[in-house]
Amino acid sequence: MTAAGQRATFEQIYRSVDEFCRIIAKDLVIQSRVFNIRHYLQNLVGGLVEQAERKGIELETALSPALPCRLRGDPRRLGQLVTAMVKSSIQQSGGGVIFVEVEFVREYEDAGALHITIARQSERGKRLFFQEGPEKGVVADLDLIVAKGLAEALKGSLDINESGSQDGKNIRLRLPLAVAEPKDRPEYHRQRFKGRHLLLIHPNPRWLDHKRAELDTMGFNVQTASQYRKALNILTDALAEDRAIKCVVYNAASGDGEPVEFCNDLLGHAELKYVQQFVICSDIGKKFFTDRMMHSSASVHFVDKPAGIFEFEMTSLNLFDTSAEADPRTPCRVIWLGQGAALEDARFGDGADLQIQKIQDLRSLPKLLDEGQYQMIVVEDNGNEAMVNIHAIRAYEQKHQRETLVTIIGVGPAESERAMLEAGVDHFIHIESLLSGDGRNLRYWSDGRHH
């Protein structure tokens, strides 16, 4: 290990010991705020995808379609727990698939328990395992010990299943949290994709089950295949029987040539080349894939890992004509909170229908919110002031017991995303996207979506 690596390890151990001492001394600061659990978890896991892929591990989330979007609790502490659990699993695994399985059990109308299971599955079989790998070390063990104490401090529990059964060991977290959204929130996806046929491909049955549940929620009619050769036959047969399947979804990883070969088979076919291909991959997986493609194609679309409902929907936003299904669009009224530097150069695209009210501070915000005509607030990242503003908006809503929370979008550089999600934004848009003309995100969120 290099000197820099040793120093980083020492600093991590120091932070873990310090945190453990705070837990023992009951000197832990625990916050309570509204946050978007779906986007926050996707961001957390997304930051570990490439680390896992370099070890030959496929890291993927499985968020229950019934998981609420907004919860109230301490997102930063939750992030510590999930990060420790996933990192420990990566360090002790030598390959296969790691699932971050998340569900929420309502125990009361406005409260319940968040359940997160880190489950691992080998490539050779269906059995989950907790392999003692060569990278198992004191840091991973210490982080899990701290996480267990932290979970208990949050009135939850963290357990490692060592039953010895064929399922091996899983790490399970249970955390009580309040719900910060109506129980009967509408489903925004189903009408957009209802009745569209899709073929889902992966060799792992559990992966197929998880992704099928998410795609079912979006309204797709999903068929599955565990082998690419079989998938190609299904597509060919469906075409011959005049019931063509127009979409396929599959995973691609760096070093795996089979998905690229399947892609090239479709691109080389006179009629199947028009099938819309959704390829789930990381940045390094995308580079490996595109370097080996027969040629670039408008029918190949890359979905960021980990792939969930939002990632699928944003990738396919402009591919399907839903004008006949959609309600007539009314202008979306947006409050833009900040200096407006990003707003001046932003390009929102055709049909955005945005009416933006720019304000520089919070003094005029209560009056605008009380009018009830603004669907969304965009908070421009300007350091700590932006975080204070987000907290103030949510505190105002809680004080006045507003039944429907306003959608808050954070805008800034990529490195601000985690902090703004922890502060309580529903979604984060990279400033580069707005400047390059990909402003469709704002219109998408204007309908009150916060999934």
Image (tube, grey):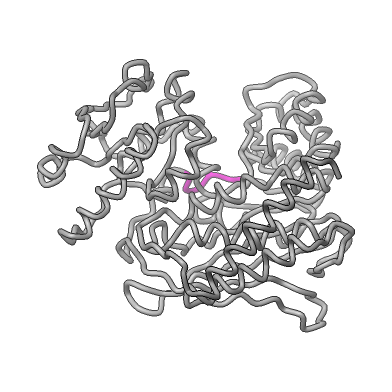
- Quadrant of res 244: top right
**Quarter of the figure that contains the N terminus:** top right
Looking at the image, residue 319 sits to the left or right of residue 253; the answer is: left
Question: x, y percentage for residue 327?
Answer: 28, 39
* Identity of the residue drawn at 80% across and 43% down: 54
* Identity of the residue drawn at 18% across and 60% down: 399
* Identity of the residue drawn at 24% across and 55% down: 395
Question: x, y percentage for residue 142?
Answer: 70, 66
Question: x, y percentage for residue 172?
Answer: 63, 72
Residue closer to the observer: 367 or 282 = 367
Vertical order, 294 against 188 (above or below): above
Question: x, y percentage for residue 49?
Answer: 69, 46
Looking at the image, residue 410 sits to the left or right of residue 363; the answer is: right
* Identity of the residue drawn at 60% across and 46% down: 307
- So how many labels did they put on this image? 0
Looking at the image, residue 312 sits to the left or right of residue 98; the answer is: left
Vertical order, 101 against 169 (above or below): above
Residue closer to the observer: 263 or 145 = 145
Residue closer to the observer: 451 or 393 = 393
Looking at the image, residue 19 sits to the left or right of residue 329; the answer is: right
Residue sitting at the far top: 345
Magenta residue check for 61: no
Magenta residue check for 194: yes
What range of the chain is rendered magenta?
Answer: 193-198
